[in-house]
Image: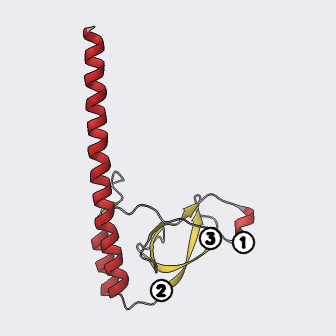
């Protein structure tokens, strides 16, 4: 019986932590969306046709989306629709002819979280750097 109570407590604790994490991630995404909307309203830079790269980096594909690249490696972008895009896709011979469809991703306040040293940067920092161009 004692093991069963402990297991139930553990399951409740896990559920509470998961719900808390989901709330924090949703709040962060909402804040990031507001930053993206403000950027699109304020920028005077002309949007460019965004292209996606294959995971191995060998191929580029048309996306049909226009916007602004956030980093020099052109792996992340904000679209004219103020959506956040991750511009890496699986390699595809067909996509070389037809292009690819990319879906908006959930934006994050910190880009590169959990990555190597120096890869972690605030979304606001990236957007401010673009506005200064």
Cα–Cα span, label 2 and label 1: 22 Å
Quadrant containing the C terminus is bottom left
Q: Residue at x 74, y 72 (%)?
A: 97
**Position of residue 19 measured from the top left corner of the image (x, y, whole percent):** 30, 43
**Position of residue 108 measured from the top left corner of the image (x, y, whole percent):** 34, 61
Q: Which residue is mark 2?
A: 47
Label 3 sits on a secondary structure element that is: strand
N-terminal label among 2 and 1: 2
Q: In the image shown, does 40 or 114 lie closer to the viewer?
A: 40
Q: Say which quarter of the image contains residue 11.
A: top left
Label 1 sits on a secondary structure element that is: helix
Q: Which residue is mark 3?
A: 60
Q: For residue 128, which numbered disc appears in the image? A: none
**Position of residue 12 measured from the top left corner of the image (x, y, whole percent):** 28, 29
N-terminal label among 3 and 1: 3
Other-residue count near label 1 (Cα within 10 Å), few / some / many at <14 / 14–19 / ≥20: few
**Position of residue 45 measured from the top left corner of the image (x, y, whole percent):** 41, 89
N-terminal label among 2 and 3: 2
Pick out the residue farthest to the top. Answer: 1
Q: Residue at x 30, y 33 (%)?
A: 14
Q: Say which quarter of the image contains residue 90.
A: bottom right
Q: Is residue 59 left or right of residue 49?
A: right
Q: Which residue is mark 1?
A: 98
């Amino acid at each position: 019986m004692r093991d069963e109570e402990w297991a139930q407590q553990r399951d409740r604790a896990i559920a509470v932590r998961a719900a808390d994490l989901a709330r924090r991630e949703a709040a962060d995404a909402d804040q990031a969306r507001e930053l993206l909307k403000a950027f699109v309203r304020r920028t005077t830079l002309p949007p460019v046709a965004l292209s996606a790269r294959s995971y191995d980096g060998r191929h580029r594909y048309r996306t049909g989306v226009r916007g602004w690249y956030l980093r020099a490696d052109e792996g992340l972008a904000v679209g004219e629709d103020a959506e956040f895009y991750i511009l890496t896709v699986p390699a595809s011979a067909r996509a070389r002819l037809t292009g690819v469809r990319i879906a908006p991703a959930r934006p994050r306040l910190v880009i590169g979280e959990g990555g190597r040293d120096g890869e972690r940067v605030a979304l606001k920092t990236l957007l401010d750097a673009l506005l200064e161009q």
